[in-house]
Amino acid sequence: MFKVIPSLSISKGQVVLLKKGDFTDQLKYDFNLIDAAKLLEDNGVEVVHFLDLDGVKNETPRNYDTLEAIANHSDLKIDFMGGIRTDGDINKVLEYGANYFTASSVAVNNNELFASWIMSYGREKLSLMANVADGKLIYKAYARKADIDVYEHIEYFHMRGLKYLKVTDMNRDGVLEGPNFELYKNLVSEFPNMSIAASGGVRSIEDIKKLRDMGLYGVIVGRALYEGKIKVEELREFSR
């Protein structure tokens, strides 16, 4: 079933959104995270994408207290991302309430380690995030471009049992200019048996429906939801 996955992008316990992955170009939102979590839950949301921006920047998870608070005050399932580099990081975020985890840079820097996690934690527990700009992978706090073909990168883990893939077009992330539909069309064609979620650029419920109809597993939404361009009540259409 197609999933709409709200993103909670956190810095110092507050919702903060980066435009195109730029830490110097931020939007800050002043709303209560517990109330927001309960509102999402009341409207049929099952899973949230918890992005620890401080973890991304410092290359180790930081917002454990916020993670724990959401886990303790809602029944949402939490997919944690941000700074995961070691088994110790994974175990700690799971201990603080995450149900799943997503990693990106470590898969670029140490593909054998990430591949080993598919076996040791199980393919239902983890996702690969591929941050993409102009056909290349972006990593290390969105600051470096790897000379690695995106499709070869994904195929490496696909051949080792990876099931869940998230792909962000960084040129569209946080700017409400619409998703890169062509990118996701090509990914679905190339990896038809993977569960692929789109991220970046979503601006309306129509964008979400178009991505669903393309055969994607899900979509991650942030700014459009924060700013009311997508009403939280509209998410009920995609719930069980």
Image (cartoon, grey):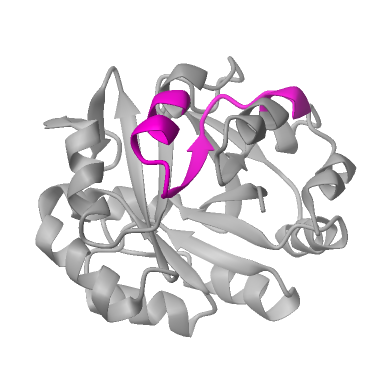
Q: Quadrant of residue 49?
A: bottom right
Query: From this viewpoint, is residue 180 visible?
Result: no
Foreground of the two, 53 or 38 = 38
Q: Residue at x 43, y 75 (%)?
A: 93
Foreground of the two, 88 or 3 = 3
Looking at the image, is 72 positioned above or below residue 116?
below
Foreground of the two, 180 or 161 = 161
Query: From this viewpoint, is residue 60 visible?
Result: yes
Foreground of the two, 166 or 191 = 191
Give the residues drawn in magenta, as a range.
185-207
Q: Residue at x 63, y 39 (%)?
A: 221
Q: Residue at x 31, y 23 (%)?
A: 133
Q: Residue at x 30, y 35 (%)?
A: 142
Q: Where does the image place residue 123, in percent across and percent down from the top left?
A: 37, 69
Q: Where does the image place residue 172, in percent across and percent down from the top left?
A: 48, 21
Looking at the image, is 225 positioned above or below residue 86?
above
